[in-house]
Image: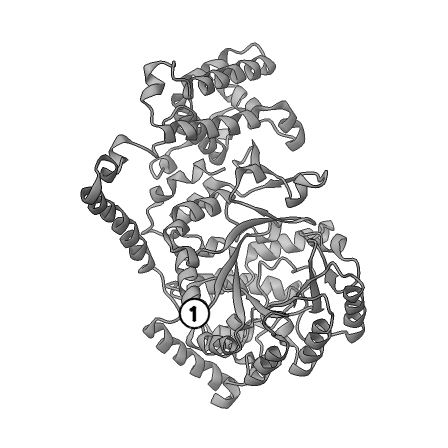
Amino acid sequence: MKELLQYDKKRLLETLWECDPHIYRILKSGNSLHDARSRMMDYLNSIERRLFNIYSDKYFQKINLLERNNSKECIRVFKNIIRSENEHITGFSALNLLYRAARKKTSPYKLKEGFIFEFIYLFKGINCDSGLYTEKDVPAFLKLDGLEAANERMKSLDKYASNMEEYFKKYRTGLDIDLIEERKLNKNIIMRYFNAGESDWQDYKWHLKNIIHDIDTLKALVKLDDDEIKGLELAGINGIPFQITPYYLSLFDMGNTGKYDRAIRAQVLPGVDYCTNYIQSKKKGTNLDFMGERSTSPINGITRRYPQILILKPFDSCPQICVYCQRNWEVTDIREAVFSRETMENALRWIRDNPNITEVLITGGDPLTLNDSILDWLLSEVASIEHIERIRLGTRILVTMPQRITDGFVEILGKYHELGKREIAIITHFEHSTELTPDCLAALKKLKKSCLNIYNQQVFTYYNSKKYESCLLRKVLKKSGIDPYYMFNTKGKDETIDYRVPIARIEQERKEEARFLPGLARTDEPVFNVPRLGKSHLRAWQDHEVIMVIEDGKRVYRFYPWESKFELVDPYNYTDVSIYDYIKRLNDDYENLDIDEYSSIWYYF
């Protein structure tokens, strides 16, 4: 793959036709696009028949079953792409572009690299030439029995494990001794700037009073590069809120060397692309409510997408705003946010009147921004509803301001956590292993003493998507008492383009990296959130399918919502980010990264 990245478009197109000369001949000699489509279907059907026919010629009989299965999947995808119905749905014909390119009616230099790459790998796969499997890859232990087989098997397993550990060494955790010491120095710098002492630092109310909202304070404390400054200036001019707690700022690499804090900075510093796309979306009147929460809210303060659980939103801000937040359309500056008791009383009344609701997720905004007395009142009201069996608190406080987990707050939680009757659970949001710090551990220990279960929802973004990077996060979380719960595909909003990762990469991560972890450390489920309807799992191909590759190499997916077996619910079509663009970006950003280790990404659909 690395070699292909160096090719110009003309050489890429020549490579494409070399991958399947028969497809090239069909496209070049067809009397019309309709004729080419018909002949292409016949060709694909003939391959499919021969792949699993014991009477096929010797060529197909000699190909290993895994390669033939991959060919079958590639054929399925290519058939979808060339179907006229899917062309109508997406408003684009990949077949027509290939047809014109083969007949030299489109210059190769007008084609996008991402488009050509998709079909190079698709054609290779169709022809059982993916490069994923060779005879030398057959494990030696499968040819042996007994103790000899066991000893050989140990070599394979040790190789998998040691390879993963070598990757872990490339990344950092917030529990690394040198990082702990560096962040102590950062903490002292911040305290001096705010003329604060240790007692202030341990008081979450001090952190709330000193949230960083402005570029001047940031410049005084950390080194910012030109792009970060431009993004922050755009945010300031256009009223795009950004908020960083003093604690979270102490996790920065103050000198901006880029060694370990890219994932941390990216979460809280709005970039130029984010601001530009956000501004354009607002000007065009684009609905920023990607999940369609307005259409799933029966009453102010409640969102419901599932039978027995709903979301209760008492507060519309957070101590710290994540740039890629799905609720950026309603999350406000903390200085303007309000808690409305009247809104909550109306919402609570609605929950009392609906016995189908057994679980309430209190989130927002971050509800733990509210003080203890309000939270105590809110929890007592929800807990008093007879049919509520579980209360979840969705919060990022453990990451952004762990000082908030006070003994008094934990005591409040303990009042309503009654085993056998009602559970209180914490749903948190760690993105990267560098966020797990001794301060987080101290807060976790307090919560665990009350027997609370704590779960993590990770958003899979460009900044935590390198090989085994999320595996290390799972590992440190599980050791710290947090269960991995969900891995979310980044919401497909224009403003979050810098954060988005191809769906194929999530699937690859699950199959080729997470699978090597013990089962208890990989309990998270990779999901795509279908607007208005909710989560569609990314493990099963029956839940989604590629229906087109458009001009710039982006795949268009059709998602079948979770209700599709129960209701006549329309599928949702989603245009993904280009695999080529993602791979090229990784290759350009990380000079020591072997991009060929990601080559199988093209065969995840």
Which image quadrant for residue 139?
Answer: top left
Q: Nearer the viewer, residue 61 or 595?
A: 61
User: Looking at the picture, does residue 449 appear above or below residue 512?
Assistant: below
Q: Position of residue 181 (x, y in %)?
A: 35, 78
User: Looking at the picture, does residue 130 appear above or below residue 245?
Assistant: above
Please state, as top left, top right, bottom left or bottom right, where the N terminus lies in the image.
top left
Residue 336 visible in image = no
Q: Position of residue 458 (x, y in %)?
A: 51, 59
**Left or right of 278 on screen, residue 187:** left
Residue that appears at 70% across and 65% down: 312
Q: Secondary structure at mark 1?
A: loop
Tell me the residue that label 1 is attached to. 480
**Left or right of 263 on screen, residue 176:** left
Give neighbour class at mark 1: few <14, some 14-19, many 20+ (Cα, 10 Å). some
Which image quadrant for residue 420?
Answer: bottom right
Q: Position of residue 11 (x, y in %)?
A: 39, 27
Residue 397 visible in image = yes
Residue that appears at 23% across and 40% down: 141
Q: How many marks?
A: 1
Q: Position of residue 188 (x, y in %)?
A: 43, 83
User: Looking at the picture, does residue 263 appear above or below residue 12?
Assistant: below
Residue that appears at 50% across and 64% down: 430
How are the colours assigned in the image?
one colour
| Residue farthest to the left, as pictured | 148
What is the three-letter code of the residue carrying label 1?
Ser
